[in-house]
Amino acid sequence: MAMQIDVVIAFFLLGVVARLLRADIHFPVALHQTLTLFLLLAIGLKGGVALAAHASWSLLPQALAVVAFGLVLPLLAFPLLRQIGHFSRVDAASVAAHYGSVSIGTYAVGAALLEARAIPFESYFPFFVALLEVPAIAVGLILARQGQAIAWRPLIGELGRNQGLFLLLGSLLIGVAWAGKVDSVLPLFRDLFHGALALFLLDMGLRAASRLPDLRQHGPFIAAFGMFMPLLGGLLGGLLGWTLGLSTGGVFLLAVLGASASYIAVPAAMQVALPEANQGLAMTASLGVTFPFNVLAGLPVYALYAHWLTAA
């Protein structure tokens, strides 16, 4: 399952180069939000239709394993950030929560690469994406507030209002409930998906490159952690996918989910739950290092790893 640079990834590179050369390119905030909402709805709707077709009790063990995976990842990241990075407890917990959750953009790129190469995968994967959004936030908050009372109500309220989680779950449920009646809207989300993803990645390239000054400020540890943690998460995610008996494409996608770091859902939740945390550290690591690392170098590695696991 060798992977070369896809056309959508070329748009990410274009954005990076444009920012480094200081080209006069500015994405309107509204366009970024629109593209994000489109990707969330498209992924959720298609996943809901597939989930309706494949829903059975056999999915329950897989779902529980995925939730457990989301609980373990921040527990692995936290001691690295505390002992090696010398982060404060609150900052380490906040960054760890980002790395236990997922990047919808990285998942979208991984799924698009599989579809472009006609590599099959379990089409209900958006269900796993939704499951992985929440557990890491809870673990991060517990790590930060060890021995202290936790204000769960504001956090739960923020999660309920979070646009990423809300729209992903909402469109997933629509796909499940109206699986046989979505033909009128599916062409929009299916046929325009790759074009919207290309525009999204162009914007993400601009945003990632704009984080480079922050990366220099925070030192080499952020760069090292931002590349090591996705490799560790991808290794464990692929191994979990192989243990669950997923297809090669499914093993690859679970590795992608394990390797990704949130820059949408978790930052909003952490802003409410841990306002004293330095959110710049998490965003520099997740958006400035891990996202470009995954898109440019990580995805081919996870693809080779998935092929090796399933061929053994």
Image: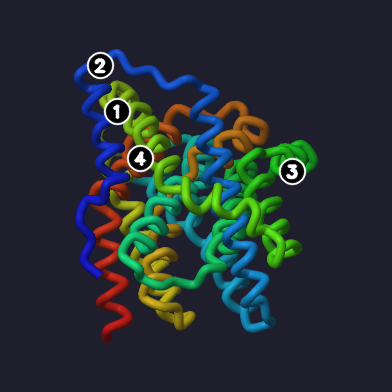
Query: How far across and down, in percent of the image, does residue 147 sit?
Result: 67, 46
Residue 37 pos. (x, y %): 58, 39
Residue at 77% from the left image edge and 39% from the top image edge: 157
Q: Nearer the viewer, residue 4 or 309?
A: 4
Q: In the image, residue 278 lies at what x, y percent?
A: 49, 28
Q: Please name which of the two marks, 2 or 4, marks the residue nearer to the observer.
A: 2
Q: Which residue is mark 3?
A: 160
**Label 3 neighbour load within 10 Å: few <14, some 14-19, many 20+:** few
Residue 129 seen anywhere in this rendered image of the structure: yes
Q: Which mark is residue 209?
A: 1
Task: Identify the element where label 2 is drawn.
Answer: loop
Q: Nearer the viewer, residue 285 or 140?
A: 285
Instruction: Of the two numbered discs 4 and 3 on the same chain, state the one appearing first in sequence.
Output: 4
| Residue lying at the far right of the rendered structure | 153
Front label number (1 vs 2): 2
- Which of the marked residues, 1 or 2, is nearer the chain's N terminus? 2
Would you name the residue on which mark 2 appears? 23
Horizontal side, residue 273 vs residue 287: left or right: right
Residue at image x 22%, y 51%? 5
Q: Amino acid at mark 3?
A: Gly
- The answer to whether residue 201 is left or right of residue 102 is left
Mark with earlier residue (2, 3)? 2
Name the amino acid, label 4. Gly
Q: How many C-alpha atoms fall within 10 Å of the one at disc 1: few (<14), some, or many (≥20)?
A: many
Q: Is there CB contact under 8 Å for labels 4 and 3?
A: no
Circle 4: element type: loop
x and y percent of residue 87 in the render?
42, 36
